Image (cartoon, grey):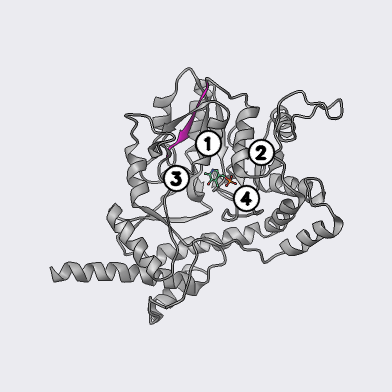
């Protein structure tokens, strides 16, 4: 799938946007490699729990893919973040700066430690955490800054790393949405002290549920590994010298992950082609795509667009839903939720972007016909709006 194919179907243009019964989900995992074979191997060998060959294989394979030497697999991305923060020694009385425009797990992981998430606004063009606002939110209690690489693009890592170094706080990367994203040609996940990935069913590669913690620091890695497995001591059986967790990944999940990793380059290529196709086919409409910083090579986890107004976003989503096309709104900013809201707190850029943004169907197995269908439906929406404006 590439942009040249896009213009060919564009001019063909005879398909009708409304095709009863047609459904285009916003996401579906691509499980067409050796996932099934490897899972059956787990069942046949009885290695279905958290020991077995796929655990080590997936950890070393993922570590090599990202280019960070130490990897710890865990049972989801949220606990990957929690483990990273606990291993850094973050706890009650501490503050961690997180973007408000993110999935709620980024903030929840901070709350689990007893520390307080302090929200920062995002930038208007790439929607990533705004380093200028992070600088304003630094206090003597700040222990870490969480860079969330949103929707497959990447945060401004150089500015954040410089800021963290100046204040002597840890930079944590939430890479749940950024498998395969590059910053200055290097994978995200190796630019801070520690990073967390997610392999939920709609992430770029999946294990069903799963996560990974990566670090270059061997001592931190050792703590992360011990905390993952109930804080087991290294010198005595069933002897636990810290209160740890059971956050282990199963061999079955790692088996799926191993098969996914064999195809990660193909998946990323398909997603980048998809993003290019949407840009090409929707080029002349009054829509704004998420921008990427100058140092960023996005993996386009989700293709995101902004409409001109919140009402237009909602009307467009309704039209797409009527055509069987599933979309998602951008995340509501976490500071708006009653569980996190503080009186007087305001993040105008995140509020605005969130209210006008939506995710288009973005999974790697989408056919050219599917993308064409989605784009025709969007074009029909704007054509109808223009016709209505002309009547008045
Ligand atoms: C998906 C996601 C997570 C959490 O991952 P789970 O595997 O669902 O627990 C954390 N942060 C962000 C930004 C995410 O998108």
The picture quadrant where one finds residue 333 is top left
Q: CA distance from mark 3 to mark 1?
A: 27 Å
Nearer the N terminus, badge 1 or badge 2? 1
Residue at 29% from the left image edge and 60% from the top image edge: 286
Q: Say few, some or many: other residues with alpha carbon within 10 Å of mark 4 (under 14 / 14 to 19 / 20 or more).
A: many
Q: Is the CB–ligand 1 distance for label 4 below 8 Å? A: yes
How many labels sit on residues?
A: 4
Instruction: Identify residue for label 2.
Output: 214
Q: Which mark is residue 293?
A: 3
Nearer the N terminus, badge 3 or badge 1? 1
Q: Nearer the viewer, residue 367 or 333?
A: 333
Nearer the N terminus, badge 4 or badge 2? 4
Q: Which is more foreground, mark 1 or mark 4? A: 1
- For the C terminus, the image quarter is bottom left
Q: Is the CB–ligand 1 distance for label 2 below 8 Å? A: no
Q: Which is more foreground, mark 3 or mark 4? A: 4
Which segment is the magenta one?
Answer: 94-100
Q: Secondary structure at mark 2?
A: strand
Nearer the N terminus, badge 3 or badge 4? 4
Residue at 55% from the left image edge and 22% from the top image edge: 92
For the stretch drawn in magenta, the main secondary structure is strand
Image coordinates for residue 292, horizontal then vertical, percent: 44, 48
Q: Secondary structure at mark 3?
A: loop
Q: Which mark is residue 199?
A: 4
Q: Which is more foreground, mark 2 or mark 3? A: 2
Instruction: Identify residue for label 1.
Output: 108
Q: Say few, some or many: other residues with alpha carbon within 10 Å of mark 1 (under 14 / 14 to 19 / 20 or more).
A: some
Residue at 34% from the left image edge and 31% from the top image edge: 345
Q: Which is more foreground, mark 4 or mark 2? A: 4
């Amino acid at each position: 799938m590439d942009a040249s194919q896009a213009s060919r179907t564009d001019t063909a243009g005879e398909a009708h946007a409304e095709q009863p019964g047609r459904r285009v989900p916003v996401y579906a995992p691509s499980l067409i490699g050796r996932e099934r074979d490897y899972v059956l191997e787990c069942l046949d060998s009885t290695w279905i729990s958290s020991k077995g060959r796929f655990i080590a294989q997936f950890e070393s394979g993922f570590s090599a893919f990202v280019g960070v030497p130490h990897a710890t697999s865990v049972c989801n991305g949220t606990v990957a973040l929690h483990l990273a923060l606990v291993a850094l020694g973050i706890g009650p009385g501490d503050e961690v700066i997180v973007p408000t425009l993110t999935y709620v797990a980024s903030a929840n992981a901070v709350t689990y430690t007893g520390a307080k998430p302090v929200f920062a606004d995002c930038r208007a063009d790439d929607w990533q955490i705004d380093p200028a606002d992070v600088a304003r939110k630094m206090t003597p209690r700040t222990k870490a800054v969480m860079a969330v690489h949103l929707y497959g693009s990447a945060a401004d890592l150089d500015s954040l790393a410089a800021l963290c170094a100046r204040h002597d706080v840890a930079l944590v990367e939430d890479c749940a949405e950024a498998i395969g994203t590059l910053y200055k040609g290097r994978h995200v996940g190796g630019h801070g002290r520690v990073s967390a990935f997610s392999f939920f069913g709609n992430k770029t590669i999946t294990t069903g549920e799963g996560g990974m913690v990566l670090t270059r620091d061997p001592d931190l890695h050792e703590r992360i590994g011990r905390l993952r497995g109930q804080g087991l001591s290294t010198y005595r059986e069933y002897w636990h010298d810290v209160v740890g967790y059971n956050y282990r990944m199963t061999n079955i999940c790692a088996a799926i992950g191993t098969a996914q990793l064999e195809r990660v380059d193909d998946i990323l290529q398909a997603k980048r082609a998809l993003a290019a196709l949407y840009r090409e086919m929707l080029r002349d409409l009054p829509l704004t795509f998420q921008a990427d910083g100058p140092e960023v090579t996005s993996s386009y986890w989700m293709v995101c667009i902004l409409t001109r107004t919140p009402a237009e976003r909602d009307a467009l989503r309704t039209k797409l839903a009527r055509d069987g096309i599933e979309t998602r709104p951008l995340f509501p900013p976490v500071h708006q939720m009653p569980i996190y809201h503080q009186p007087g707190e305001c993040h105008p850029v995140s509020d605005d972007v969130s209210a006008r943004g939506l995710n288009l169907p973005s999974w790697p197995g989408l056919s050219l016909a599917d993308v064409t269908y989605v784009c025709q439906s969007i074009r029909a929406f704007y054509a109808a709006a223009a016709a209505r404006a002309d009547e008045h």
